[in-house]
Amino acid sequence: MPRNYKRTTDRQEWDPDSMKKAVQAVFDGTMGYLKASKTFEVPKSTLQDRVNRFRQNNDLDCSTRKGLGRFKPIFSISQEQSLVEHVLIMERRLFGLTYKDLRRLAYQFAESNSIDHCFNKDYKLAGEDWLAGFMKRHPELSLRAAEPTSVARAMGFNMVSVNRFFDLLEEVIDQHKFLPTNIYNVDETGLTTVPKRQSRIIALKGRKQVGLASSAERGQLTTAVLCVSASGNYVPPLLIFPRVRMKAELLDGAPPGTVSVCHPSGWIQSDIFVEWLNHFISSVKPKKEDPVLLLLDGHSTHTKNLPLIEKARDNGVVILSFPPHCTHRLQPLDVSIMGPLSAYYTQEVNSWLRNNPGRVVTQFQLARLFGAAYCKAATIQNAVSGFSKTGIFPTNRTVFGEADFAAAETTEIPSTTPSTSADPYVNPTPSTSFAPIVHSSIPSTSPLLIDPPPLSNNTPPVPTTLKNQNRVTMSPADIMPVPKISAVRKRATDHRRGKTAIITSSPYKNELMTISQTKTPKLNLNQPPKTKKPKPNIINDNICLYCLEEYGSSSSRLDEGWVRCRECEGWAHEGCTGYDSANLDNFVCMGCVASR
C-alpha cells in the first residue's frame, strides 16, 4: 500500500440520541442502514454493530451507549438508575449515603445479581474510578453537608399533623376573613455574646487548626421575641436580658420601638409573654370587631398560659399553635428570617471585635449589634416569602408534597396480613426489622422487574445468558433496606406531646382550666420523685428542657426520674435525654451543647 494512501473510516463523532433513533428506525423496518445513517448523521458500520447488539440484548440504551475502549460498563443504564433512585430515597428518609456506602452498595448489587465486575473483592468496595464516573454520569447527585435533624422532627412532620393544622387555619380564616395584614407569626430566638456559628475565613492551606477571636468560650444568652405579618409589617422586638435590673443604656442602638425586660435566665417566661402580648396589642391595635390571627409554637409559656388566653380573647386576638416539631417547615420566621438574622448577627459581632481589639462583646453592645443585623434580615421580601413557602398565605397546603413527608414514613407501621395471634408483633422474624421499599417511581414495564419483550419473528432468539444480564433479582432496596420500625414501643404512661389547636377557643380554654384545677395539691413541685438529689427552685425548674412538659401536670410522666444539666442547671425527663443510666451524672442538654 502506498505511503501517501489515507484509509477512510467512519470513526467520526456521533450523538447517542441520534444513534438511538437510527437503531430504532432500522429495527422497526422504516429505514435501511444507508438511509438511517444519512438521516441521523451516524456512521453506517457503527449503526450495523449497534443494531446487532440491540437484537441480542434488547436494551436500546445499553446498545447505543458509547464505548470506553477496552473497558466495558458494569451496570446498564436501568441498573444505574435504580441505584440513583435508592440513593435519593435514603436521602429523603434522612439516612443519606456517603461515598463509601455507595461503593459498598454497588459491590453488593453486582455480587447479588451475578454481574461481572472488576471491583475490589478484598475490601468489598467498588473502585473510586467507578464512583467518579457514576457521579459524572448523574449530575443530579452531589456531595452535600447534611444538617442534623432530630428524630422528633422527622416523626412530627407528617401528613396527618400538617393537614390538621391547615384544617384549623382554613377554618379561622374563613370564619374571620383574615387579610394578610391581620395574620402574624411570633417566635423567640437566642442571641449570645459568642455567636453559635462562625463564618468561613481564608487561611493557609493544610493548617490543622484555624482560630477566630471571640468574646469568651461561652456567651450570655439574651432572648429576642420577633413578630411579623404576612404583609411584611414587623412588630418592634422584645429583648429579655439575663439580669435582675434594667438599665437604659442596654437598648442603645436597638431597632426603633424595641421594648425590654429582665429575667435572671434570659429565657421567655409565662408572665413575660403576657407582657409581650400587651406590647403586641398596643402596636397592632386589634379589636373584637376587627380581630387578628397570631401563629405561634407549642411552648408551654404560649399554650398553657390562662392569663394570656384571657387577654387575647378580650382584645380580639385569635391564637393558633403549630403542631409539635413542625415549626422548622411551617413557621414563617424559622423558614425565611431567623437564618439570615443569625448570619448577619455573626458578621456584626466579628466586625465589632475586629474594630475594637482587646475588648469583648457584653450585654451593653448586644442591642446595637442585633439592631444592625435585624435591619438587614427583617425585610418585606423575607416576610412575604416565609408565609408563601409555608403555605399559610396564600393558604396552600399543597406546598408540601409526598417527598417532604418521606422522613416520617420511617416510623409508620407497615400494613401486615392478619395472623392468628392477637398481637401482630408477637415474635417477629428478624427480617421484619426493616421493611423493603418498593420504588413507586419505577414503572411496571421496567427491565428491572420483567423479562425483555419478545422480538419480531425474523430475529434470532435471545440467548439465556444475555437475557439474565439485564434482569435484576435483588434491587438496591433489598440489599440496603430503608430503616423502618416494625412496632411502636408502648410507654408505661400516657405522655401528651401537645397538639395543634386554636388556643383562644372556648373548648381549649375550658380544658386548660380543668387541668389546672385537677392538679394534686399535695404534690411538691420542687421535689420530683425518683431523683437522688433534691430539685432546687431554679429557673424553669418545672419544665422539661426537651418535651416542654410541666412537672406535675396531668400529662406528665410522674413515674420517670428527672436529671439536671451540669451547665445550665435545667431539668429534663431521663427518657427525653437519650443518655444511658450510667452517664446521667454527666448530662449536658442540647441547648448547652449547641451554644459551645
Image (cartoon, helix red, strand yellow):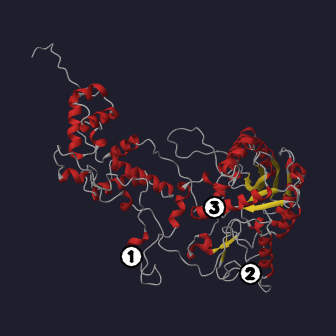
- According to the picture, the residue beneath numbered tag 2 turns out to be 527
The secondary structure type at the circle numbered 2 is loop
Q: Nearer the viewer, residue 484 or 161?
A: 161
Label 3 to label 1: alpha-carbon separation: 35 Å
- According to the picture, the residue beneath numbered tag 1 turns out to be 429
Residue 308 position by quadrant: bottom right
Identity, as a three-letter code, of the amino acid under mark 2:
Gln
Q: Please identify the quadrant where the N terminus is shown.
A: top left
- Where does residue 455 sit, x and y in percent of width and height? 22, 47
Which residue is the extreme one toward the left? 1
Residue 70 position by quadrant: top left
- How busy is the neighbourhood of tag 3: few (under 14 within 10 Å), some, or many (20 plus)? few
Q: Nearer the viewer, residue 231 or 377?
A: 231
In terms of sequence position, does the residue under pointer 1 or pointer 2 come before the other?
Answer: 1
Identity, as a three-letter code, of the amino acid under mark 1:
Thr
Labelled pair 1, 2 in contact (Cβ < 8 Å): no
Q: Nearer the viewer, residue 297 or 365?
A: 297
In terms of sequence position, does the residue under pointer 3 or pointer 1 come before the other?
Answer: 3
- According to the picture, the residue beneath numbered tag 3 turns out to be 163
Identity, as a three-letter code, of the amino acid under mark 3:
Asn
Q: Residue at x 24, y 35 (%)?
A: 26
The secondary structure type at the circle numbered 3 is helix
In terms of sequence position, does the residue under pointer 2 or pointer 3 come before the other?
Answer: 3
- Where does residue 381 sit, x and y in percent of width and height? 72, 41
Q: Nearer the viewer, mark 1 or mark 2?
A: 1
Q: Nearer the viewer, residue 502 or 107?
A: 502
- Where does residue 538 sit, x and y in percent of width and height? 77, 71
Residue 86 position by quadrant: bottom left
Residue 157 is left or right of residue 242, and the answer is left
Which residue is the extreme one toward the bottom? 522
Residue 366 is left or right of residue 210, and the answer is right
